[in-house]
Image (tube, grey):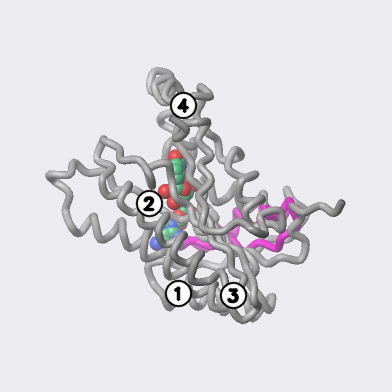
Amino acid sequence: MKNIFKLDGKIAIVTGGAGGIGEALALGLAVHGATVVVSSRNQETIARVAEKISEESGNKAFAIASDVTDEASVQNLVDQVVKKFGRVDILVNAMGMNIKRDAFEYSMEDWDKLFAVNVKGTMVACKAAGKVMREQKGGAIVNLSSVRGIRGYTGGNSGYCATKGAVELITKSLALEWAPHGIRVNALGPALVITPGTKHIAEDPKLAAKYAAAVPMGRIGMPADMVGAVIYLVSEAASFVTGQTIYVDGGLTAG
Ligand SMILES: NC(=O)c1ccc[n+]([C@@H]2O[C@H](COP(=O)([O-])OP(=O)(O)OC[C@H]3O[C@@H](n4cnc5c(N)ncnc54)[C@H](OP(=O)(O)O)[C@@H]3O)[C@@H](O)[C@H]2O)c1
């Protein structure tokens, strides 16, 4: 039986590829054979990440900066990838942010900023890469949702939860609309993952124990935990899977 998880010859873009989860996913894609283009706003950071991925995977990775809130910038990213490689087989939207605010005090400027990255950014990147995939008659997209995409949460997370709920329904809607073009669109829904932005939790034993206790498997997720589900979703192994979110959450959303 052939290896249905292999990504040899595939061209992948990872937006937010310099982030905690994005970097792990980009490395995972490269290790499984894909040529990876890492993207985020800071060229220096993504160049460093691409170099690291090239060294660790033995598969040369590339860095092209873009801002997902700017449609022209994302179009330029996709155009450059097509110019260099002739195609886009895989898009992983691992960019994202949170702005935590008490709901009574939530300024609509902050609300718009959050939606611009998490929601508009997801749509803009899907649209630009999706058009190339339509021409090719195939492709696979994975958007980063969260367990907060199906569950509300306290602690100033109303905006974040709303954006991730939107990501889930963008994912399902595009899956339906683009299925006739052979484009599969799925999402990954992590629970808390330790990344540079959340490492203060891991560093505080009491806080870490509190978060871990809420997870049936009794621990907090790491970026490497996210890789398997994404490799599955973008590979031939998931050739009949679209419009789904895989929650990689140690069982959190099972109950
Ligand atoms: N960590 C968690 O606990 C967790 C749990 C569930 C879901 N998630 C989701 O998983 C995704 C990745 O999370 P993470 O923890 O890895 O985040 P992170 O470490 O903060 O990384 C976010 C990435 O997004 C990029 N980014 C931010 N704004 C951007 C923009 N306007 N245009 C292009 N890139 C932009 C950042 O790079 P620049 O700032 O340099 O552009 C960075 O590479 C997010 O969607 C997050 O909501 C995370």
Location of residue 109 (image quadrant): bottom left
Numbered disc 3: secondary structure? helix
Residue at coordinates 56% horizontally, 40% vertically from top-left?
223
Q: Residue extending furthest left? A: 104
Label 2 CB, ligand 1: below 8 Å? yes
Measured from the top left, where is residue 180 in percent x and y?
Answer: 57, 74
- Three-letter amino acid code at disc 4? Val
Q: Residues within 10 Å of mark 3 (few under 14, many from 20)?
A: some
Q: Nearer the viewer, mark 1 or mark 4?
A: 4
Do the residues under discs 2 and 4 have CB atoms within 8 angstroms?
no
Q: Which residue is mark 2?
A: 164
Which is nearer the N-term, disc 1 or disc 3? 1
- Three-letter amino acid code at disc 3? His
Q: Which residue is mark 3?
A: 181
Which is nearer the N-term, disc 3 or disc 2? 2
Residue at coordinates 18% horizontally, 41% vertically from top-left?
102
